[in-house]
Structure formats: structure tokens, C-alpha cells
Amino acid sequence: MKALVVDDSAVMRKVIIGALNRADITDVDQAADGNESVTMCKDGDYDLVLMDWNMPNMLGIDAVRAIRELGKSMPIIMVTTEAEKGRIVEALKAGAQNYIIKPFEPATIIEKIQATIESANA
Amino acid sequence: MKAELVNPFIESVQEIFKTMLGSEAKRGKVEITDSHDSPGELVALIGISGRATGTCALSLPASTALKIIGQLMSTEYTEMNDDVTDGIAEVVNMVGGGAKAKMNVDGAKPMDLSLPTVVSGDNYNVKYPTKTIWLEVPFESSHGPFVIRITFEDEK
């Protein structure tokens, strides 16, 4: 399984990658903004994307829409401080499959990743 | 600016410490200040806009920042570096995000967060608009002390 972690914070990317590693996902690429993530999804073949919302160059929500417009159907999990119900609905409508609100306990992110993958494979 | 505005920020800080650091942040007394001096060697700023417009500032000594980010990264940091400033930016991002969600009114459009900014160094000054009044909350934690300040325009 190959994953892409998208967050403008290098520290948060490392925290998320650590969680992915604990879920036995070790083939992980990184992007620092939405624009970069769309380019990487266009050129690459990812099985899972973890996407922040507030980033320079392109918001994560816009990147989700752009990735779906490329015809890419891999599961996308938002990992963000945007916690309002309206934001969650907006993300699901844009094409995200799951939503993790920062701050999160490490166990929570692993559970959500596993649940999202299982759901995608069902 | 109502004093109760500070409560979502206090709760947000405490949630971050509980979930991501597995520790407690004990708050001190809320004070009002018009001081432009930053009470720490670093200050991380984030703006909130929309239904309410304001700024949250996280000020802390370098020693506290090193310990917080060190725990987050399971690494011991002995001096300031890009990881630490980046991590503190992310912490204030989470403070602002958590607070604005708590301030949200059902059915209202969510407020927006700016990208965070971190200023650090031995000798710096951050200039705010002259009449800025801050609500200031000191915290103590096992990682060290820090201060949250918020200022908001009165809702129109």
C-alpha cells in the first residue's frame, strides 16, 4: 500500500507518517500543499491520501476536488483543525471518505486509517 | 470584547495537551493587558475571521517549545530549529481551530483561520495596532510555562 501525506507542517507530516508506520504502511510520500498533492496524484499511484485543509497555494478541500476530477478514486482522509459540522459535510461532498480532527490521539488516527482502508476494500 | 471569548481557547489548549501530549495544562488567572511585549522567546500567531475577527498569540520560552515538540516528535531537541518552530506553528493552528469550532453557532458559516506565523529570537518586537487589548491566560505544564493571548473585534 502506498500513501500520500499532505500537510504544510513538516512536524505534522512526521506525526501522521509515524501513525501510518504503526499501521504497517511504510511506503509513504509527502506533499506540503494542495497543489503539490494534485500533481503527485496525477503522476503517481496512491492507495490512500491523508489531506490537511488549510495550506498555502491550494486548500486541501480544493485539492480533494481536483484529485477526484483527475478520476482518482483512492480513499482520502481529511486530517485537519476544521472541526465544524459544515466543514465535515463539505469534505465528504468533495470526495473525502473520512475525517480526523486535530488534535488527535495516536490510536484514533490508526483506527480511522484502518477503517477507511477496510471500507474501501469491501 | 467579552471575557468569555477566552474559554474556547483555554479548552482547546487543554485538549491538545490531553490528546497529543498525554499531559495537563493548568491555567492561571485571566488578565486583561494592553502590553505589546511578548512574554516569551517565541510567539506564534493565528488569525480568525468571519463572524468574529481576532488574533490568538501563543507565547512561550524556547525551553517549553523544545520540550513540547520534542515529545510530539519523540526526539530530544536541545536548540531551536525548523522542526520546533514548525511544530509550534502547528500547535497554535490547533489552538485556533479548536477554539473557532467551539465558538461556532449551529447553522452559521464556519469562521476562517489564517496560516500560522511564528516569530522567535533574542530581540524582537511584534507591533500590534495601538489600541489592542488582550485577554491573557498563563498556563503551567510539565513541559514548562506558556501564555495564550487573544484579542477580538467586537461583533458587528
Image (tube, coloured by chain):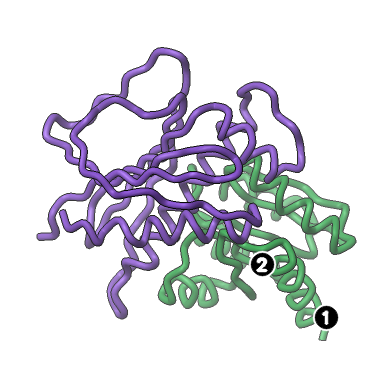
Chain colours: A green, B purple
Q: Are marks 2 and 1 on the same chain?
A: yes
- Whether residue A95 is situated above or below residue B73 in the rendered picture: below
Q: What x and y, as percent, mark residue A112?
A: 71, 72
Residue A74 shows up from this direction: no
The residue to which callout 1 is attached is A121
Q: Quadrant of residue B5?
A: bottom left
Q: CA distance from mark 2 to mark 1?
A: 14 Å
Give the residue drawn at x 56%, y 57%.
A63
Give the residue drawn at x 21%, y 50%.
B152
Q: In the rendered image, which quarter contains the C terminus of chain B? A: bottom left
Q: What x and y, as percent, mark residue B19?
A: 61, 61
Q: Amino acid at mark 2?
A: Ile
Q: What x and y, as percent, mark residue A48?
A: 75, 64
The residue to which callout 2 is attached is A76
Residue situated in front as seen by the camera: B138 or B37: B138
Identify the subunit bearing mark 2: A
In the rendered view, does B30 fall on the left or right side of A59?
left
Q: Amino acid at mark 1?
A: Asn
- Are there few (<14), some (14-19), or many (20+) residues within 10 Å of tag 1? few
Q: Earlier in the sequence, mark 2 or mark 1?
A: 2
Residue B4 shows up from this direction: yes
How many tags in the picture?
Answer: 2
Give the residue drawn at x 38%, y 48%.
B28
Give the residue drawn at x 69%, y 43%.
B71
Mark 2, secondary structure of its residue: strand
Residue sitting farthest toward the top: B123
Identify the subunit bearing mark 1: A
